Amino acid sequence: MSDYLWVEKYRPKKIKDCILTEDIKTTFAEFLKQKEIPNLLLSGTQGTGKTTVARALCEELGADYIIINGSDEGRQIDTLRTKIKNFASTVSLGEASKHKVVIIDEADYMNAESVQPALRNFIESFHTNCRFIFTCNYKNKIIKPLHSRCTVIDFAIKNGQKVKTAQALMKRLGKILDDEQIEYDKKVLAELIQKHYPDFRRVINELQRYSVRGKIDSGILFSLSEANTKELAKILKEKRFNDMRKWVINNLDKEPSSLFTSIYELLYSTLESNSIPKAVLVIAGYQYKSAFVADQEINMVACLTEIMANCKFK
């Protein structure tokens, strides 16, 4: 199954092949040069390559490693007492690396009052033969004792670096499509990148989804277009809950953040002025939750229901 998913099939195995800004790539190249992996906290928006880089670093240094999903098994304190302890307490059999590595993916999902403090203790208990790499979307959700025990690397892409990384992604996607023998229009490919950048994983997943047509051309542009918010405004004003839910379902393929932005921009032309501040706070709350919730449909429906019930339309 992993070979079928392009994000896994074409996942870079070496740091030099990862799409990174120059400063981040230089930092990881130095780790390789020193043949040393410190405890790391990798932060940044989803799909920017944090987990891929962590895996590539371990692979290149020949380090034994395990990956634990902080949003799933990592939520349970028992995980620390069993899986991590059993792995970290044994000596690495690999000769290339001094340390074994525990990669905690989406560590910001882990309980800050129980699980994260326990991880702090494990870092100290197994420091002689084990290192920890944490990835997160929101580093402010990681407790300070973990921050202080890690080298923090921010994967945020600054404005001056966006063009270069987007070009690198364009080149990578072109190579994938050539390998998969899929015809493509470079302009359409650029539009797909622009829509989901900097979520590289999302771009690759969407590209694979559209590729079932046998080619990437202007035929997919309608799918890439913005949601029909004018229709939504009428639905909310008339309090048609079932139609609102259908609208959400029809737009689930779009990035949640872009949907919330479209709804936010809709407010000023459709709501009475005294309802706009209330709606802004509602949208801000649910947009924040969208980074963590398991079901985006329920989250969006809840947001629109609150606006529909508590705001007055023109």
Image (cartoon, rainbow, N blue to C red):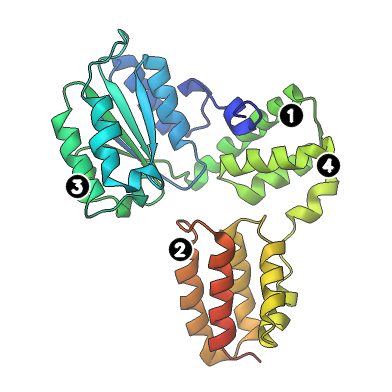
Task: State yes or no: discs 1 and 3 in contact (Cβ < 8 Å).
Answer: no
Q: Which residue is mark 2?
A: 289
Q: Which mark is residue 143?
A: none
Can you give x and y, in whole percent of width and height, for residue 274 in the image? 52, 92
**Mark sitting earlier along the chain (4/3):** 3
Lateral position of residue 171 relative to residue 115, left or right = right
Q: How many residues crowd mark 2 within 10 Å: few (<14), some (14–19), many (20+)?
A: some
Mark 4 vs mark 3, foreground winner is: 3
Lateral position of residue 49 relative to residue 109, left or right = right
Q: Secondary structure at mark 3?
A: helix
Q: Secondary structure at mark 1?
A: helix
The residue drawn where x is 36% and y is 51% is 109
Three-letter residue code for mark 4 = Asp
Where residue 185 sits, quadrant-wise, is top right
The residue drawn where x is 50% and y is 40% is 48
**Mark sitting earlier along the chain (3/2):** 3
Q: Secondary structure at mark 4?
A: loop
Q: Which residue is mark 1?
A: 177
Q: Which residue is mark 4?
A: 217
Task: State yes or no: discs 2 and 4 in contact (Cβ < 8 Å).
Answer: no
Label 1 and label 4: CA atoms lie apart by 12 Å
Three-letter residue code for mark 3 = Pro
Task: State yes or no: discs 4 and 3 in contact (Cβ < 8 Å).
Answer: no
Label 1 and label 3: CA atoms lie apart by 45 Å
Can you give x and y, in whole percent of width and height, for residue 313 in the image? 63, 90
